[in-house]
Image (cartoon, rainbow, N blue to C red):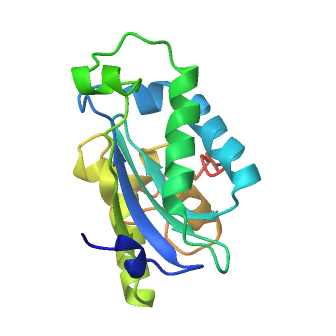
């Protein structure tokens, strides 16, 4: 059996993709405030930095940096998923194996993680995260998706307002944010 912990970097920076079981649901954006609360709750006991995030209807992508000496992102994800699930009304389809394990049927059990290797890898993953709503045809311009750390990066002048979108001279950035996670 492979020891996956050897691939972890204590205090490292990681990219994650986390999906709902039912990929056609819009639960994450419909219940975004509950998801934000779940993140905040877990961060109090198990701190980490959210470098970037995009919340889509049925999945999310994020880059985290863990505290020095800490590599337990699995604990954090388990607790975030659990905190969110407890606040959501039941009624989803649940498989027999999940019923036997007394699990909800909201989240896919696993998530995808990638340890960020260097500055270029970091920048590529931030671009991927921020462009994702356009990729999925949820909006035409990155700036138009409200559930993204892109707005914070615009305020920090790390991305232009019209990045990967249509240049629009009449666009007045209104400071919408979702980076309160």
- In this orientation, does residue 25 appear? yes
Residue 47 on image: x %, y %: 70, 60
| Quarter occupied by the N terminus | bottom left
Residue 151 on image: x %, y %: 56, 56
- In this orientation, does residue 141 appear? no
Where 57 sits versus 69, above or below?
above
Residue 143 on image: x %, y %: 45, 52
Residue 164 on image: x %, y %: 33, 64
Give residue 57's quadrant in the image: top left
Where 3 sits versus 142, above or below?
below
Q: Residue furthest top?
A: 91
Taking depth in this image into account, of 142 and 167 the one nearest to the observer is 142
Q: How many marks?
A: 0
Residue at (24, 33) in percent of width and height:
23
Residue at (62, 48) in percent of width and height:
177
Give residue 124's quadrant in the image: bottom left
Give residue 176's quadrant in the image: top right
Q: Residue furthest front?
A: 1
Taking depth in this image into account, of 6 and 108 the one nearest to the observer is 6
Residue at (30, 47) in percent of width and height:
140
């Amino acid at each position: 059996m492979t020891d996956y912990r050897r691939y972890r970097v204590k205090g490292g920076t990681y990219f994650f993709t986390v999906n709902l079981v039912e990929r056609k649901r819009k639960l994450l954006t419909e219940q975004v405030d509950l998801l934000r609360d779940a993140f905040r709750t877990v961060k109090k006991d198990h701190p980490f930095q959210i470098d970037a995030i995009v919340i889509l209807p049925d999945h999310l992508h994020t880059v985290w940096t863990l505290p020095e000496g800490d590599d337990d992102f699995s604990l954090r994800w388990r607790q975030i998923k659990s905190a969110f699930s407890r606040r959501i009304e039941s009624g989803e389809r649940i498989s027999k194996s999940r019923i036997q394990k007394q699990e909800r049927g909201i989240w896919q059990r696993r998530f995808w993680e990638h340890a960020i290797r260097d500055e270029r890898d970091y920048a590529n993953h931030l671009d991927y995260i921020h462009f994702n709503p356009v990729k999925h045809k949820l909006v035409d311009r990155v700036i138009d998706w409200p559930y993204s750390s892109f707005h914070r990066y615009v305020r920090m002048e790390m991305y232009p307002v019209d990045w990967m979108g249509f240049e629009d001279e009449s666009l007045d950035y209104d400071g919408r944010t979702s980076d309160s996670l």
